[in-house]
Image: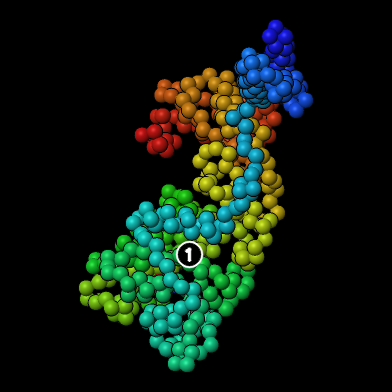
Amino acid sequence: MAELDALEQTILADIAAAADEAALESVRVSTLGKKGSVSALLATLGKMTPEQRKAMGPAINGLKDRVTAALAARRQALKDLALDQRLNTETVDVTLPLPDSPAEQGRIHPISQVIDELTAIFADMGFAIAEGPDIETDDYNFTKLNFPEGHAARDMHDTFFFPEKPDGSRMLLRTHTSPVQVRTMLSQKPPIRVICPGRTYRCDSDQTHTPMFHQVEGLVIDKGSHLGHLKWILAEFCKAFFEVDHVKMRFRPSFFPFTEPSLEVDIQCRRDKGEIRFGEGEDWLEILGCGMVHPNVLKNCGLDPEEYQGFAWGLGIDRIAMLKYGMPDLRAFFEADVRWLSYYGFRPLDFPTLAGGLSGDIYYPRKLQTGSKMTQTRSVMTSTKLAETVEKALRDAVGAAVDRVDVAEGYDHDGEPALFVTVRYRSGTDTVNQTKAQGMVRERLQEAGEERFPYMNHIYPDDPLADDGEDA
Ligand code: DAH
């Protein structure tokens, strides 16, 4: 018995002394393993007389149980220890930027992006989305839209036809999204307020035309809808889409078989070194066709023109995408070149704005001309660190009552990576020397290894023009 006690003490001491999994395993093998000391003792039980076994059995089995328990406890303790050590040595800096994961490398195609943008704008105005098939009947694409058979207006659309069916009719690839107007009027009761984005096809190919392209149609049918409504909707859309506060529009008389009167709309713009700016300048740019829905179209779709009236418009999505994001050649949109897409595409979950983004590590190429110097730089600092550095520099530089600092990452007009800093001052703050403040911020950023140029926008509470109303 004393021997058993001594053996137990030794084994428990060995277990306690085992510094790692391997050491512990060798203690287990030397005790409970096939040739282990405890196993050997258990084997002796078989050769004992019943009386001896009665005395020794519980002692030896008890030893085995305690050793087993001690091994398990030590194993758990070693695991806990290893975890503690890892936690102490591996620090996780939660402010570090995320590495690009495979999902991050994917880009949203500009067409999808622009469809999302315009859908959001029209949805805000209460429009629903309507869809129709790309392969359309001649009746919906032309006849019901008041292009009678053989009418010269059909020549404006260079159509891809399918082979004639036995009944003499021919399906075609829709040449515009206007047949969705017909489908909507045939299937819904007014009031109708829909937009119909989708693919359209014409036998056409050059720098600004591709055989497949995209349009968005708008349709409003009600009892009292009129051109004034149309004008307001289009103006609101242009302001929201091109992100300008004012936009002058010009409505020119035109002709479409399915509208009367028909109009074409130009928006004010300025052409500047190959770049187009909206909401300023003396130039005009045609962006869409529209008009009041022709009474014949209403009749063709089962609506009484004496009761209902409405308006419609059609807009080229590819064209406005090119205009907004500065892409020179439409054909590249559909060549499926991932280099092009990584350059002109959008990151999922970003909300791009022309001002360079709202917040966070916004990175996307935009408004860039071919041959731009833009390179893909990554922020050397996290957004938080960046904002802190800028804010501290500002407080040191101007000693003024800085209220809030917002830093957004984006690109300047030359396509160079830049930082857009908005500084708000508390009431009663004297005007600061902005050049000095900008210089100081730049210096601090450079000390921290940040080479992007900070553009600063100073906002004083008592300056009504500078206030964007966000805090109101
Ligand atoms: N469907 C026309 C086209 O592709 C565009 C258009 C013009 C649509 C005027 C309309 C409209 O709804 O009212 O050329």
Q: Nearer the viewer, residue 403 or 357?
A: 357
Residue 91, visible in the rendered structure: yes
279 left or right, relative to 372: left
Identify the amino acid type marked 1: Ile
Residue 180, quarter of picture: bottom left
Q: Which colour scheme appears in the figure?
A: rainbow
From the Cβ of disc 1, is ligand 1 less than 8 Å away?
no
Q: Nearer the viewer, residue 62 or 298?
A: 62
370 left or right, relative to 394: right
Residue 367 lies, with reference to residue 334, above or below; the image says above
Position in image of residue 282 (x %, y %): 50, 58
321 left or right, relative to 239: right
Position in image of residue 222 (x %, y %): 26, 67
Residue 468, quarter of picture: top left
Badge 1 marks a residue whose secondary structure is strand
Which residue is located at x 74 percent, y 26 percent? 33
Residue 429 lies, with reference to residue 265, above or below; the image says above
Instruction: Report the quarter where the N terminus lies.
Output: top right
Q: Residues within 10 Å of mark 1 (few under 14, many from 20)?
A: some
Which residue is located at x 67 percent, y 57 percent? 338
Residue 235, quarter of picture: bottom left
Position in image of residue 286 (x %, y %): 48, 65
224 left or right, relative to 297: left
Residue 189 lies, with reference to residue 126, above or below; the image says below
- Which residue is labeled 1 in the image? 287
Q: Quadrant of ligand 1?
A: bottom left
